[in-house]
Image: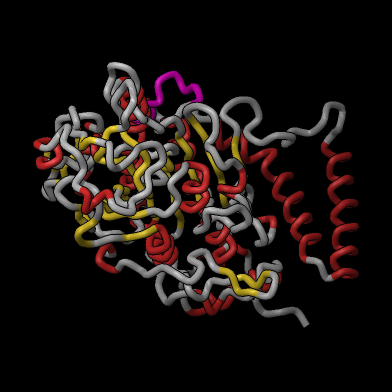
Amino acid sequence: MTHPLHHLSRRSILRAGASGIGALALGDLLARDGLADVRHAQLPVAKAKRVIWLFMAGAPSQLELFEPKETLQRLDGQPLPPSLSAGKRFAFIDGERAKLLGTKRTFTRHGECGAPVSELLPNIAGIVDKLCFLRGMQAKEINHGPAKLFMNTGSGQFGRPSMGAWSLYGLGSEAEDLPGFVVLRSGGRGPRGGAPLWGNAFLPTNVAGTPFRAQGDPVLDLASPEGVGADEQSDFFDAVGDLDRIAADRTGDPAFRDRVKTYELAHKMQTSTPDLIDLSGETQETRDLYGLGDGRPSFARNCLLARRLVERGSRFVQLYHTDWDHHGDPGNHLGKPLEQRCKEVDRATAGLILDLERRGLLEDTLVVWGGEFGRTPLGEVRDFVGRDHHVSAFTLFMAGGGIKPGHSYGETDEIGFAPVQGAMDVHDLHATILHQLGLDHEKLTFRFQGRDYRLTDVHGRVIRDVLA
C-alpha cells in the first residue's frame, strides 16, 4: 500500500511549516531518505528557515571595530594587571611582558540603540538597529585551524559534522535543483581547516557543504564531458542509479541511496547553477547596494549569490572571507590590511541585510557575522604593534531570523579582557541558532560508534535574551 504522504513533494511539505502535518510529513520523508527519524528534535515553532553565515576567517579585532574602551585608551602602554594574566594562555605573547594596547580608531554611537561602531564600518554602522551584538562571546581553541573547526563543528578536532550539515540533516532542503548547503569563498587562500569546516563527517554524505568556485564552472566536473550528449548522460545516470539501488537493497547501506540523490542533484544543477550565477538580471540599484563593481569574484558578489541561493531554497549558505589575521605590520598599527578587509565586506554585508529585508526574507533568514575568536587588549612584543589571538572575549553580530534587533547582549570589563556579564560560548551560539531553526540541540542527535552525537556535544544553552 502506498504511504499517504508519498504523493507530497519535499518542497510542499517544508512549506507547510514546522508543526502539525508539515512536521510529521517532513519526518516521514527524512526517514525514507535515510536521514533517520529527527521528528523528536523539532520544536513547535521555527523563527528562521535558513542561515547565511558571514565568516570572517582569521578573527577581526573587536577592539578596532565594535568595542571602544576608554580605560584601555587611558592605560595604553601599561602592564597587564597580574590578576588578569595569571593562568591565561596566549598564542604569541608573554602575558607578564605584554603591555596594554589602545586603538587609533574613532568610534561613534549609531541608531536608536546607540551601538558603538568604528569608522572602519560606516555601512554596518548605518544598520545597527537591525543587528544584535553578542559582546561576551568566548571560544576555546587558541589557534586558527582548531578554532575554525570549533566554531563550525563544536569540536577543535577533525571528525565532527559542521553546523550546516547538522541543519540540513535536521530539516532537509527546500531547494530542488541546488544544494541545500553551499560554501562561497573570497579573499586570499583558505580558510585554514579546509573542507572539514563544511563537511558531513559521520552524517549522510548528501548533507555536506558544496563549495562553489569563484571562477569557471561553479562546481568542478559539473559540465558533461566533451562529446557526451544529453541522451548518453541520461543513460549513464539511469544505469548507475539502478546499480546503486540494487546495492542498497542487498546491503542495507544508505550510502548507495545517497549516491543516487547526488547524481540526480548534479543533473539538475547543470541547468540551475549557470542560471544562479548569471547576475545580468539584477538591477543596477541592487548591484550598487552590494557594491558589486564590475562583478568579478568578491565578497560582494558572494553576498548577492547568497541571497539568490536562499531565494531558491538553500538551507545554509556560508561565506568565508579570509585574511583577517592581523597581528600588526611595521608602521601600520593594524592599519592598511585591516582597512582593506573592512572595505571589502562593509557595504556588501549591510547591502545583503537590507536586500533580504526589502524582499521579505530577513524575518526568517538568520544572518551571522564574525570570526573564530577575538583579539587581545594587549600588544605583541615585536618590532611592530599588533594584537594576539584572544578566546576570552570577542564580538559577533546576528540579524533577522527572530533575533532581537537593535540589541546588545553581554558586556566586557573596562579593558575588554573578559565578560563581566552575558558570557556566551560557541556551544551556546550553536544551540541558539538551532533553536531559531526549530531544532532542539539536545535532541538532534546521530548514533555513531555506539554514542549519540550532537552539534553541542554535552554543552550549550539557548540564550533567550537575544530572541525577539
The quadrant of the picture occupied by the C terminus is bottom left
Seen from the viewer's position, the closer of residues 387 and 291 is 387
Q: Is residue 266 magenta?
A: no
Q: How is the image coloured?
A: secondary structure
Frontmost residue, 309 versus 43: 43
Determine the residue positioned at 88% across, 58% down. Answer: 242
Q: Position of residue 344 (x, y in %)?
A: 37, 27
Q: Position of residue 340 (x, y in %)?
A: 34, 23
Tell me, yes or no, whether the highlighted magenta stretch contains residue 286.
yes
Q: Nearer the viewer, residue 114 or 94?
A: 94
Q: How many marks?
A: 0
Q: Is residue 439 above or below residue 222?
A: below
Give the residue displayed 52% in from the left and 37% down from the top.
Answer: 191
Q: Residue at x 55, y 42 (%)?
A: 183
- Is 328 situated above or below 307? above
Quick check: can you spot residue 104?
yes
**Residue 463 position in % (x across, y down):** 31, 66
Direction from residue 402 to residue 15 in the image, left or right: right
Residue most toward the top?
A: 331
**Quadrant occupied by the N terminus:** bottom right
Task: Decide which of 101, 210 is in the foreground and name it.
Answer: 101
Using the rendered image of the protein, determine whether residue 354 is visible from the camera's viewpoint.
no
In the rendered structure, which segment of residues is drawn in magenta?
Answer: 285-297
Residue 233's place in the image compared with 284, above or below, is below
Q: Position of residue 467 (x, y in %)?
A: 28, 64
Decide if residue 279 is on the left or right side of residue 111.
right
**Which residue is at 83% across, 71% downward?**
252
